[in-house]
Amino acid sequence: MTEPFVLGVTGSIACGKSTVTEMLAAQGAATIDADAVYHDLIRPGRPLFRALGERFGDGVVAPGGTIDRRALGAIVFADPVALADLDRLTHPPVVEELRRRIAAAAAPVVAVDAVKLVEGGFGEECDAIWVVVCGRATQVERLMTRNGLDREEAERRVAAQSPLGPKLAAADAVIDNGGQRAETEAQVAAAWAALPLADAASSIASAGGRRRAADVPEDEDSGRAEGPADA
């Protein structure tokens, strides 16, 4: 069985990575949301759930016994050391599960949506990387609307994000999602058509691809690939 072409989709918080991956799904790609992977891994009883409780205390466990992502986010976005610890705990199991899901995918193109795709090293396992961008003010407004945050907390979460520079340096395409949806769709369609895999770009008819590296370093600061930063 031929390995799928892996397309990494990254960008800062609330820039619209999920919007772009939805558009990729419409093109025929299989999609994997690293945040959803993280969500699954912190279910009660799982090793990562226990690790987070041990590190951050009972205050991050909701009354129903699940991880209170809002409480966890309030801790890590106010404390860089706590954020680094969260990343250190979550990165290895998230990466392992991403690899498993990619290997199990039937589609010839798999899009992986992950906020720290580049910083955590997983970009080295992608055949192409797209970076989704928008203005800071748009990020803040989206966070306030989507997560029910006040402006101060939304600003804090945006400020806690990794610098955009390394993402842009690794990008094969940059998608500006700060305008109308139709404008984003047009950019996605153009970038899709330009993928260095003609059959996949045109019709998802055949498989193929290359990998930039076989292994991801597990001591990077991406912890979740995504997840807590959007908690």
Image (cartoon, rainbow, N blue to C red):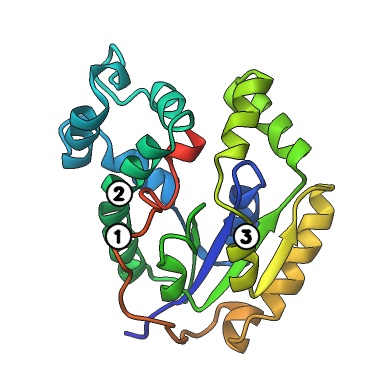
Residue in front for this viewpoint, 92 or 185: 92
Amino acid on which the number 2 mark rests in the picture? Arg
The answer to whether mark 1 and mark 2 are in CB contact below 8 A is yes
Dot in front, 3 or 2? 2
What residue sits right under mark 2 in the picture? 88
Alpha carbons under labels 3 and 2: distance apart: 34 Å
Q: Position of residue 127 (x, y in %)?
A: 50, 79
Identify the residue at image location x=31%, y=71%.
103
Q: Secondary structure at mark 3?
A: helix
Q: Position of residue 3 (x, y in %)?
A: 37, 81
Q: Residue furthest top?
A: 63
What residue sits right under mark 3 in the picture? 26
Identify the residue at image location x=67%, y=57%.
132
Q: Position of residue 6 (x, y in %)?
A: 47, 73
Identify the residue at image location x=33%, y=70%.
216
Numbered marks: total: 3
Task: Assign the N terminus to one quadrant of the image.
Answer: bottom left
The answer to whether mark 3 and mark 1 are in CB contact below 8 A is no
Structural crowding at the residue carrying mark 1, measured as other residues with C-alpha within 10 Å and reported as few (<14), some (14–19) or many (≥20): some
Which of the two discs, 1 and 2, labels the residue nearer the N terminus?
Answer: 2
The disc placed on residue 102 is none
Residue in front for this viewpoint, 12 or 29: 12
What residue sits right under mark 1 in the picture? 219
The answer to which quarter of the image holds residue 10 is bottom right
Alpha carbons under labels 1 and 2: distance apart: 7 Å
194 vs 43, left or right, is: right
Alpha carbons under labels 3 and 1: distance apart: 35 Å
Q: Secondary structure at mark 1?
A: loop
Q: Secondary structure at mark 2?
A: helix
